Amino acid sequence: MAYTCLSTALPTAGISLLFLTFVTFLCHVNCVTFSDPDNAYSQYLPNWTPDGRQGASFRFKSVRSDALLLLHHFNNRSAGEAVYNFWIELKGAKLQATHVFETFVETVTIGSGLDNDQWQSVDYSKDSAGSLTLRLNGKEQEIKLKSHKYGLAREKLSALTYTDSVVTLGGLAPSSSEMAPREFSRLLGCMEKIKFLSQNGVLQDIPVDSTVGTTDGCNNKCFTENHCQQGQCINQYYRTVCDCFDTGYEGQYCQQKGNMELTFHGQNYIQYQFNKLGQTVSRDKFRINLQFKVGEEHQAGVLFYASGSVPVETYLAVYMDNGRITVKMHTGSGDPMVTTSDTALNDDSWHKIFIRLDGRFLLVVIDDQSNANQISGDMHQLHLDPDVYIGGGPALKGKPGLPVTYNYIGCLKEAYVDYDNLIGGVKMNSSMITFNGGTPIFECVELGHTPLTFPNKRSQLILNEWTTGELNLKFTFRTSFPDGILVHALISIDDTPDGFLNVHLVNGSLELQVDLGTNGGTNRQKAVNTGTSLHNTAWHDVHLAIRSGNILLTVDGRMVGIPHKHSMVSRSAIYMGSDVSGANTGFEGCMRQIHIQGNTLSPLKVINSDMANGVTIDGCQIALNPCASGELECENGGACTHETNGTKCTCNAKEYTGSRCQFPLFKKSCADYYRAGDRESGPKRIDVDGSGPVPAAHVMCDFSTGRLKTTIEHNFKAKTLLRSYGGPHLDFKLQYRDMTPELLAAFVKHSSGNCRQLFSYWCYESPIRLGKFTRVYGPTDNEISEYPDRFKTQCNGNRQTWQQDIGYMTRNLPITRMRVLNKKQTEFTRATLTLGPLECFESAAASKPNTVTFFTPESYLTLTPLKKSLSFIFRASAVGNVVFHQMRGDKIPNSILGYIAEENLFTFETNLNGKTDEVSVATTRSMIDGEWHTITIDINDPDILFIVDNDSEILSVPIGQSIGPFRGRLRLGGTPEVPAGKEGLMGCISAVTKDSEDIFLYDFYNEFKQDAIQPGCKSKCAKNPCKNGAQCVDKWTSYECVCAHPAQKGKNCEIDNTKDMVSFSEPTVHLEYTPSSTDLLTSNLHLSFRTYQSDALIFYANDHLHNFVQLELMDSAVLIFKYNSGRQIVEVMVDSRDEAMLLNDGAWVDVSIERDAEITVLKVNGEMMQEAGEPVNLLTEYYDGPFNGAEETVMPPRVFVSSDKVDNYTLALIGGAPDLMTSLPGLQGCIRGFMIGDEHLPLKPLATRKMQGVSTQCTDNCAQGACQNNGECTELWSSFRCNCSSTSYSGRLCSKDVGANFQSASLLVYPFTLYEEESDKSTEMDSLTFGFSTETDSGVLAYIRSDDEQQDMDKSIVVKLMDGNVEASVDFGNGPTTISIEGPFNDGYRHVVALKRFGNRILFDVDNQDGNYTTLTDASPVQFTRRAALVAGGAEYNVTRFGLDGAGGFQGCIAGLDYNGIKPLELLFGAYAPSDSIGVSKAQCAMLKMDESESSDGDNDGDMTSGKPAGSGSSHSRSSQSGISSEWNVKPAEGVEYVEPKKQKTKIDPEIIKYSIIAACALVILLLLVLIIRMACKLKQNDKEEEAVTMEEMTPLRRK
């Protein structure tokens, strides 16, 4: 009675608070709620070892069908140690445990329907023997772990050194994210009674190490956050939602009275994501409600459809057929359960459908008709794909359980799936609910007659109702096109089968055309027209009739006709929309109210029958201009154009492709570029969301190391001032190039969180205090709370000196917002921040958990059917390998088969909508090279984009047709239906993404049952068995080595005959070799040579009969092989200039000569090839006469004797021949790897020690930068020579630097008259070179002038610096010729100037940029006579001629001054100094400017500056951004002043205080009652015990 009074006395708030307090009191001490969907977890540290006993028990409840419950790993794993993970998760509402050790991945699955928000009891245990047991609500599954079964694995397990055992519950902790094999959804729900198994086998409580996003107790948010004004509050743990079903209200809080209505036109449908994670889910509890209204003219259509095919095919279908409603459900066993309405319900009235599944109980209510079913058999659940369709669907034909496949035409209201209001979701643009097919109409409107749309000129209806006699055809049409066929039929006239009947638009008029065939050679074709401007998009009525003696056409009441007196019989169907060929001349628009021979065509029945070809129902949106009406929407900036010959989208050819410009041409990541064969680091564009709405982003891809790095720049300027004395608090909001915060978060997640961002904070009396004074936020605006320890070391000391806190942020990246509080200021407070770009890393190798190897061609993986997209990478080594197969379904034969057709050809065989096509993609890269290659299939109606690496093709279907659906299984790595001549893949597949979902491949096979499929890419080439640069071709069960050079032999190319080499430093030396047979003259030959010569004899061989072979180099690029065929000299010639290359550039040239009886082939470097068709025909008798044909350039001595008196011999000359035999120079260079057939000719033994000019090594003396400062190196084979003429340096190695420092008044004058005697040759050439460095804009660098005797014939060469550019002026008396090269060259670096003159041709160049020749002014003399002086560093006093008027002096450094071999600076600072050197001092000029690619990328993040701060603080040198592609003109992020809110005392509502006191009192009373009851029970127990003692004491007395 007291409890009743207490309850009635408390208001609602008090009762709620009391109940919540009581529930929390009753909950177990370690009961916890996970209420943050983005970051919630609890972390424990059980004392477990890798090979010891492990286990845990807990209870949980959740509303999620996919969530991580428990993850166990070890933190301190050393590099190279085996990977270990164990986790328990909800997967498709089932409980699944996964154990991973090294490559062993084993799973246990139990239960179903666990997302019902009911308590579930779980415990698992694993013992040292490898027995893993998983229990759920008393039921258990046990497996023996294979990783413990095998001895080697067991040894590795026991040998592991890591001991830091970590268990996270509900989600991944930061430390676990790095160890987890993939991302997991976080738990939303509660866990309690959490215990861990000790080493002695006892379950016990252990303390929580850390927890985030959780609250104590199992909290129902409906007690504290119930906003529902009507209906029921639903607890989702992180929020509440309102179930408005059957209340008469709707809206987010059930606050709006009434129920919204939605109209469906036949092209519309709702797509509802049953599982927002996009995964298959198993359900045995749900509620569905629909109210519908259909008119009499619409008798069929799909109202609701959901299905799935894994692990068995199940479905739930609600459809109307002949006006009756049918509800059909199949759970995979037995017959489907079917409920059909007793009467037709297409009466233009509202009707209700209600379906409830609760375990094995199914209730179906249709209006007042109720049907209850009990599901029998083993299967009672629906396994459903994530997408559910209401009102139709994208491709319903062939789906199981649907005899009707038309979209619904009518109205709906109160459409609920569980508590989700679908129509309300459409109105509020819910992310889980999509309305397709146009703009939704939120009222029930009159629909009228349903039009059929002919979306293109090939669409057609085929009607078979007329064969002979009278024809009666009526319809209405509308269009915006002036031309097109509306009706076509082939007819026979008087038994002559060559006539036809057409009704077609011609320039906006409707023409009736009848061809009555030919009679006696006369064509009897007649035509009449009626109507004008019939393409005005209005509806027009048409009646075509054939009656006795007349063919009549009536358009909008106007009749025309063609009389005839013939028997007319149809010899084809009637084609509406195009002719029988389906050519591109048809009608594009809409038709409705089609009646033929008195029968009315039902649009819904027509559209899904064989009568329709490409015809659709879409509300006749195409009837207007498709561009203007939006029927054809070009995506991604494509331009829509509507012309007479069709409508098309014009795309940006460099960015998008496809009929609607819907496919981006960019890869999704740098890793995709790399795996597609693009290995060049540099700026690229990536499209993170693929065909999504966000455009491609500019990034920098770096492939130079084993990791693939992606860099994304932002607009936070380096060394931004954060804090200063008197400065305000600041908020900074960062912008990343081309990236939204959502895309950034997705990008980082795709990189497995392996990202970093440099954070460099410079401070002077300005502590950083991260998390307090400095707050940093990630892309989801969540504050970053974990920082490296290095950020706590320096600046927080608040010292009076410049200090730096620097390191990489790695959590919750990238940084998108910062809040800086300017506290703890002093007079000298100052702080700047440099924030590096976002850098994310991926491994160049595929990750193990998502990679498999197929060891036999019969093995494959089986996945659910393809819907919209598929991408993966693969490795293969054989032509004919089937890589994947999207198989056909039982009722729908749509399929795609992909296989390697040729080495550079990948073929896709498709069967779509009954039509077979073959799409072959010619690939740049070999498909069988054992490297990773990418396959991408993107389906976006009306196109399929096939991409192989960086090559692609598109297959299009007619507009109006859909691609798919695919109902068969998707096979990866092979197929059970292997085509003839093909076999399954032996190789690897990885990184599979299907329908925008990353596929965890371990879920789709069992390695213990499928030994032919193993995790990881287990390559036989992984250990690099091939030696000496040979290519390893993986056969997966074996390997093959392709040697890099024919001179390499052995299984692993371990015998390297290319190391057998000789070099010739003189053209007069050669080697001699005497073989034992003449095989050298007929066998295949191979050798390599290298030289810098233009012409050389490489080898020559002949026998005693004067048969010979010869190889020579001519004109630097022509390689000639000569041989005799009988008495004819045959010449085979390869000219490398055809390939824009030379053969004398010092690189090795590989030469192969392949010979057989009929042909000789000369190959150079394996690519260039020529052949001769003359046979190998050796002389059999001695011949001493001249040969015919090509010139004989090597002539051995001929002895004029008979054949029988000649001694047999064969002689080979390598590297040249004696001067008496040839005028060809011998080779200066190297030869290696000389092969005669398969036999190696050893070269080193032929080179004796006494032989001068021959070495057994081929040292590249110029390879290691022998000449410094860009000097040009010439190889001399035993040494080298440096040409320093273009460097401004001198000396043997171009290392000697003679320079001078010039001030504006300095001057160096070198007089010629004392030293030089002029000749005609010397006056026609000039060579002036020097280097300079300066930071001034202008000044005279150097000039050469004539004497002062004849001023009217002044001659000069002048080089000046003008506004940072270098200008040369040459004047020999007829006016100056001026050449200018743009700089800037006043950047402080050394620049080298070279001016060369040859007669009237001048070459002027700066920094070896390959300057062009310039011709002197016509009539200018070519002789520079009377040269008087060379002047450097300025102009002589009072000299205004030679173009020097007003010229200023040079301020800077000049080095290596050289004019025609005279070096004035060396003379100046040597023993002899020229006169007139003023203010010139010896100096070393600046270094040459190096390319950015040669400069180092150091880690110098800044210099510390001591003393008081000034300006912007420290002088740190590192830029925060580097290497991003094109210019990004963006405003730098600026701090916005932030006003810190004042802390106010929280005022508590007196009512809350009052009710809280009441609740507290009630709780105290309740506790007192519990204590009183327990005390009473205790007293009573004590009384019983005392009574028992008394009785025991009395018993002996009684006995006495």
Image (spheres, helix red, strand yellow):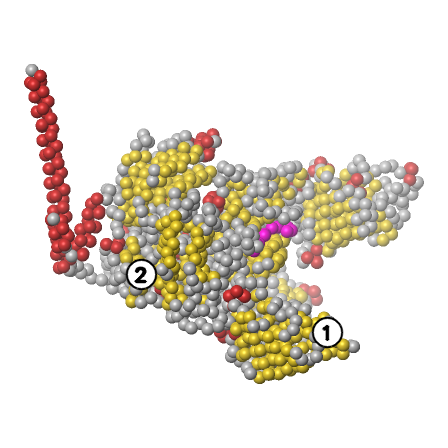
- Which residue is nearer to you in this view: 1100 or 417? 417
Q: Compared to 1243, does 741 lie above or below?
A: below
Residue wearing tag 2: 246
- Residue at the location (86% across, 50% down)? 1128
Instruction: Pick whichever of labels 2 and 1 is earlier in the sequence.
Output: 2
- Residue at the location (13% across, 49% down)? 3
Q: What label does residue 494 carry, if any?
A: 1
Outermost residue, right direction? 1202
The span picked out in magenta is 894-903
Q: Compared to 733, does 1564 lie above or below?
A: above
- Residue at the location (76% across, 77% down)? 519
- Which residue is nearer to you in this view: 185 or 243? 243
Coordinates of residue 330 in the picture (x, y in percent): 45, 51
Q: Compared to 806, does 83 lie above or below?
A: above
- Residue at the location (11% across, 40% down)? 1572
Coordinates of residue 321 in the picture (x, y in percent): 47, 61
Left or right position of 1219 against 112: right
Residues tagged 2 and 1 counted as in contact (Cβ below 8 A): no
Point out the image quarter for the C terminus: top left
